[in-house]
Amino acid sequence: MRGRTALLLLGMGLCAGCASRAAKPQPPEGSSGGEGTKVTRREKMPRNYLGEGLASFYGPGLHGRPTASGEKFNQNALTAAHRTERFGSCVKVMNMENGRQVEVRVNDRGPFVDGRIIDLSKAAAKQLGMLDKGLARVRLYRCGSDRVSHVPVEFWAVPA
Protein backbone atom coordinates (compact mmCIF):
# COMPACT_ATOMS: atom_id res chain seq x y z
CA MET A 1 0.00 0.00 0.00
CA ARG A 2 2.76 2.43 0.93
CA GLY A 3 4.65 1.58 -2.24
CA ARG A 4 1.66 2.35 -4.45
CA THR A 5 1.01 5.66 -2.66
CA ALA A 6 4.64 6.70 -3.00
CA LEU A 7 4.63 5.73 -6.68
CA LEU A 8 1.42 7.65 -7.26
CA LEU A 9 2.80 10.80 -5.55
CA LEU A 10 6.05 10.52 -7.52
CA GLY A 11 4.12 10.24 -10.79
CA MET A 12 1.96 13.25 -9.94
CA GLY A 13 5.05 15.28 -9.04
CA LEU A 14 6.69 14.45 -12.36
CA CYS A 15 3.57 15.39 -14.28
CA ALA A 16 3.24 18.69 -12.43
CA GLY A 17 6.91 19.49 -13.04
CA CYS A 18 6.59 18.94 -16.78
CA ALA A 19 3.37 20.93 -17.19
CA SER A 20 3.53 24.21 -19.12
CA ARG A 21 3.01 27.46 -17.25
CA ALA A 22 -0.04 29.61 -17.75
CA ALA A 23 0.40 32.30 -20.38
CA LYS A 24 0.46 35.96 -19.36
CA PRO A 25 -2.82 37.62 -20.36
CA GLN A 26 -2.52 39.89 -23.38
CA PRO A 27 -3.71 43.52 -23.19
CA PRO A 28 -6.95 44.27 -25.04
CA GLU A 29 -6.65 45.03 -28.74
CA GLY A 30 -6.03 48.66 -29.63
CA SER A 31 -3.82 49.42 -26.63
CA SER A 32 -0.07 49.19 -26.66
CA GLY A 33 0.15 48.46 -22.95
CA GLY A 34 1.88 51.74 -22.02
CA GLU A 35 -0.81 54.20 -23.04
CA GLY A 36 -3.53 55.21 -20.66
CA THR A 37 -1.92 53.69 -17.59
CA LYS A 38 -1.98 55.79 -14.45
CA VAL A 39 1.41 54.64 -13.19
CA THR A 40 4.13 57.26 -13.62
CA ARG A 41 7.28 55.47 -14.64
CA ARG A 42 10.49 56.79 -13.14
CA GLU A 43 12.49 56.31 -16.36
CA LYS A 44 10.06 58.61 -18.23
CA MET A 45 10.45 61.45 -15.73
CA PRO A 46 13.24 64.05 -15.97
CA ARG A 47 16.36 63.51 -13.87
CA ASN A 48 15.54 66.47 -11.63
CA TYR A 49 12.13 64.98 -10.69
CA LEU A 50 11.76 64.45 -6.92
CA GLY A 51 8.18 63.21 -6.68
CA GLU A 52 4.62 64.30 -6.24
CA GLY A 53 2.20 64.34 -3.36
CA LEU A 54 0.45 66.67 -0.96
CA ALA A 55 2.03 69.90 0.22
CA SER A 56 1.01 71.81 3.31
CA PHE A 57 2.25 75.05 4.81
CA TYR A 58 3.30 76.14 8.25
CA GLY A 59 3.94 79.56 9.59
CA PRO A 60 2.53 81.75 12.35
CA GLY A 61 3.12 79.46 15.32
CA LEU A 62 6.74 78.70 14.39
CA HIS A 63 7.87 82.11 13.10
CA GLY A 64 11.24 83.03 14.62
CA ARG A 65 11.92 79.59 16.09
CA PRO A 66 14.96 77.56 15.03
CA THR A 67 14.68 75.11 12.13
CA ALA A 68 16.57 71.82 11.82
CA SER A 69 19.31 73.62 9.88
CA GLY A 70 19.86 76.10 12.73
CA GLU A 71 18.32 78.99 10.82
CA LYS A 72 15.45 81.02 12.29
CA PHE A 73 12.17 80.18 10.56
CA ASN A 74 10.75 83.11 8.60
CA GLN A 75 7.21 82.54 7.33
CA ASN A 76 7.70 85.38 4.83
CA ALA A 77 10.70 83.77 3.11
CA LEU A 78 10.48 81.19 0.30
CA THR A 79 11.60 78.18 2.34
CA ALA A 80 10.43 74.62 2.88
CA ALA A 81 10.81 71.49 4.97
CA HIS A 82 11.68 68.26 3.16
CA ARG A 83 12.55 64.84 4.58
CA THR A 84 15.66 64.06 2.51
CA GLU A 85 16.87 67.02 0.43
CA ARG A 86 19.99 68.66 1.81
CA PHE A 87 19.76 71.99 3.58
CA GLY A 88 20.16 74.96 1.27
CA SER A 89 19.14 73.08 -1.85
CA CYS A 90 16.67 74.65 -4.22
CA VAL A 91 13.40 72.82 -4.99
CA LYS A 92 10.87 73.91 -7.61
CA VAL A 93 7.31 73.23 -6.43
CA MET A 94 4.52 73.11 -9.01
CA ASN A 95 0.88 73.21 -7.93
CA MET A 96 -0.81 70.58 -10.12
CA GLU A 97 -4.25 72.09 -9.54
CA ASN A 98 -3.55 75.55 -10.98
CA GLY A 99 -0.11 75.29 -12.65
CA ARG A 100 1.58 77.89 -10.42
CA GLN A 101 5.25 77.36 -9.51
CA VAL A 102 7.67 78.61 -6.88
CA GLU A 103 11.33 77.92 -6.07
CA VAL A 104 12.05 77.36 -2.37
CA ARG A 105 15.16 76.71 -0.31
CA VAL A 106 15.12 73.68 2.00
CA ASN A 107 16.01 74.72 5.56
CA ASP A 108 14.02 72.31 7.73
CA ARG A 109 13.02 68.66 8.09
CA GLY A 110 9.49 67.43 7.67
CA PRO A 111 6.63 67.04 7.04
CA PHE A 112 5.86 64.58 9.78
CA VAL A 113 2.36 63.71 8.55
CA ASP A 114 1.88 60.61 6.40
CA GLY A 115 0.98 61.32 2.80
CA ARG A 116 2.63 64.74 2.66
CA ILE A 117 5.77 65.34 0.64
CA ILE A 118 6.77 68.92 1.57
CA ASP A 119 5.92 71.68 4.07
CA LEU A 120 6.09 75.19 2.65
CA SER A 121 6.44 78.58 4.30
CA LYS A 122 3.41 80.85 4.24
CA ALA A 123 4.97 83.03 1.51
CA ALA A 124 5.58 80.02 -0.75
CA ALA A 125 2.04 78.74 -0.15
CA LYS A 126 0.67 82.16 -1.07
CA GLN A 127 2.55 82.15 -4.40
CA LEU A 128 1.17 78.68 -5.15
CA GLY A 129 -2.38 79.82 -4.32
CA MET A 130 -2.97 77.27 -1.59
CA LEU A 131 -3.56 79.45 1.48
CA ASP A 132 -7.33 78.95 1.46
CA LYS A 133 -7.28 75.15 1.21
CA GLY A 134 -4.14 74.55 3.27
CA LEU A 135 -3.17 71.56 1.13
CA ALA A 136 -2.36 71.17 -2.55
CA ARG A 137 -1.30 68.38 -4.89
CA VAL A 138 2.22 69.28 -6.03
CA ARG A 139 5.08 67.98 -8.14
CA LEU A 140 8.66 68.60 -7.00
CA TYR A 141 11.78 69.17 -9.11
CA ARG A 142 15.35 70.10 -8.26
CA CYS A 143 16.15 73.58 -9.56
CA GLY A 144 18.01 73.71 -12.86
CA SER A 145 21.52 74.25 -11.55
CA ASP A 146 21.02 72.25 -8.31
CA ARG A 147 22.37 75.29 -6.55
CA VAL A 148 22.88 75.33 -2.82
CA SER A 149 22.62 78.61 -0.97
CA HIS A 150 24.37 79.43 2.26
CA VAL A 151 22.50 81.20 5.03
CA PRO A 152 24.19 84.31 6.49
CA VAL A 153 25.12 84.07 10.16
CA GLU A 154 22.60 86.77 11.15
CA PHE A 155 19.75 84.39 10.24
CA TRP A 156 21.00 81.59 12.50
CA ALA A 157 19.10 80.81 15.66
CA VAL A 158 21.14 81.49 18.77
CA PRO A 159 20.59 78.91 21.54
CA ALA A 160 19.20 80.51 24.68
Image (spheres, helix red, strand yellow):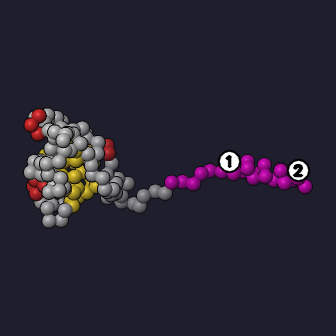
Nearer to me, 142 or 117: 117
Instruction: Determine which of the numbered discs, if any, sits on residue 18 in the image.
Output: 1
Task: Specify whether residue 30 is in view.
Answer: yes
Q: Give the side of residue 41 with respect to residue 104, left or right.
A: right
Nearer to me, 37 or 51: 51
Tell me the element at label 1.
helix
Q: In the image, residue 125 lies at what x, y percent?
A: 14, 56
Q: In the image, residue 19 lies at what x, y percent?
A: 66, 51
Q: Is residue 119 above or below residue 157?
A: below
Asked if labels 1 and 2 touch by Cβ distance under 8 angstroms, the answer is: no
Question: Label 2 amino acid?
Answer: Gly
Q: Which residues are magenta?
A: 1-24
Determine the residue positioned at 68% across, 47% down: 17
Determine the residue positioned at 24% across, 51% down: 118
Task: Specify whether residue 147 is in view.
Answer: no
Q: In the image, residue 43 lies at what x, y percent?
A: 31, 43
Q: Is residue 48 above or below residue 93?
A: above
Q: Give the side of residue 139 with respect to residue 16, left or right.
A: left
Based on the picture, tell me whether residue 23 belongs to the magenta stretch.
Answer: yes
Nearer to me, 3 or 131: 131
- Quarter of the picture containing the C terminus is top left
Q: Quadrant of residue 126?
A: bottom left
Mark 1 crowd level (few <14, some 14–19, many ≥20, 10 Å Cα): few
For marks 2 and 1, give the one nearer the viewer.
2
Question: Label 1 amino acid?
Answer: Cys
Instruction: Determine which of the numbered discs, if any, sits on residue 3 in the image.
Output: 2
Mark 2 crowd level (few <14, some 14–19, many ≥20, 10 Å Cα): few
Tell me the element at label 2.
helix
Determine the residue positioned at 59% across, 51% down: 21
Chain-order first, disc 2 or disc 1: 2
State the CA–CA distance, disc 2 to disc 1. 23 Å
